[in-house]
Amino acid sequence: MTSKIESIKLTPIHVPFKPAVRKAMAESEGGLGMAIGAEEAWLGGDFVTCQMADNQGNEGLGEVFLWLPETGISPEQVIDSIEKSLSKYIIGENPFNIQKINHRMDINLARNDVAKGLLDMACYDLMGKAKEVPVCELIGGRNVEKIPLAALIPLGEPMLMKGLVRSYYKKGYRTFRLKLGKSVQKDVEIVDTIRKTFGNEIRLRVDYNQAYTPQMAIKAIEAITPYQIDYAEQPVKIVDYIGMAHVQKSVKVPLLSHEGCFSLQDFVTLVELGAVKVLGINSERPGGITKALKALNYAEIRGLGVVFHNQPLGISSAFQIHMVASHIYSIEHATELFGQEMLEDDLIVKPLEISDGMVKVPEGSGWGIQLDEIAMKKYITSSPLTLE
Ligand SMILES: [Mg+2]
């Protein structure tokens, strides 16, 4: 019997950050642990989960992370676009017709890649469950058993950041993303302290969260270039593609656009402008597995770096792990998977197995994880919407 999608249940969720994360953010200038200029305190992660049921009793899971200063849309807007439009092109369809589903979503609703991605990823979990294989085996193979992870270090005083690097170093992490952007001088102090303490064995990437003008960004990146930086994330404003290209053409360190890259077209435009040399992927950008595969293939052909990064709940963490395990030969940067460190709960029954700075690829059908519906009840912000 062919699988046929019968219903979609959408749940808006807010999971608070762990007390230690809130403390680290509160201690930083601006209160966010990064140089982003938002006025509202960031107290936890907002998400929408999708539970997609087929006619065979299978359930496909999707999840997207949303933060207004970055994503620009709320959980309610994601749910609304699925209710008013996208659900029509999903319900009654076979999840294996994923190109058709994406085509119909794209021609009938412009943009909204986050909502489309949420549905696309649930379709892949359904396919895996219908065939009783892990998602990685549908898209390239379970080529490795474990993948290396990178630790995220919030912006703070150099000694505090060094202490955090040390704690993750002891746990086996060897790649670190340092939040920078206070000032060129402070940035150098932070990177110098960490590189000198831990030597050349560790890999460093930095994230400016739009802190600088293009001219200042060039100065800031040149100042840390001697410290062997793998790549620098979002030095300039979200949509300043021209400024980003100006910076990338002036510095040797590869750039990655995070807040400024939400669709396949954004990425291609940034690459063709000479504005980025590294692609960042997660479940909501460029949107699900189908578009992530296109972006990944394009990046590989163009000889660009690729990193999977986010602080999601367990479902999107599984998405990232399956993508990386199936495309490990195209990905030279350790995966940033930090939801389990930052959030109070991952909302999956059995946590991901993380040890020695590596995460094990989940076994079992689909994502290989199970949604913890009891824990989920605690974090629901308004009634789930079921579409049939
Ligand atoms: Mg960032």
Image (cartoon, rainbow, N blue to C red):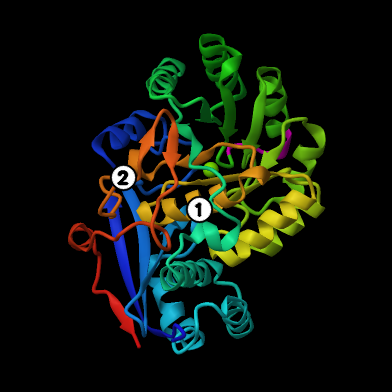
Residue 262 seen in the current view: no
Among the 4 quarters of the image, the one containing residue 225: top right
The kind of secondary structure the magenta stretch mainly shows is: loop
Instruction: Name the N-terminal-most of marks 2 and 1.
Output: 1
Q: Amino acid at mark 2?
A: Leu
Q: Position of residue 113 (x, y in %)?
A: 56, 68
320 sits left or right of 332 in the view = left
Question: Who is closer to the viewer here, 155 or 135?
Answer: 135
The answer to if 81 sits in the magenta stretch is: no
Mark toward the viewer: 2 or 1: 1
Determine the residue positioned at 36% across, 85% down.
55
Q: Amino acid at mark 1?
A: His
Q: CA distance from mark 2 to mark 1?
A: 21 Å
Location of mark 1 (residue): 322
Mark sitting on residue 343: 2
Are there few (<14), some (14-19), or many (20+) residues within 10 Å of tag 2?
many
Determine the residue positioned at 42% across, 59% down.
367
Among the 4 quarters of the image, the one containing residue 11: bottom left
344 sits left or right of 83 in the view = left
Helix, strand or loop under label 1: helix
Q: Position of residue 296 (x, y in %)?
A: 67, 54
Among the 4 quarters of the image, the one containing residue 111: bottom right
Q: Residue furthest top?
A: 196
Question: Who is closer to the viewer here, 328 or 234?
Answer: 328
Residue numbers of the magenta segment: 211-215
Relative vertical location of residue 97 with respect to residue 64 in this rendering, above or below: below
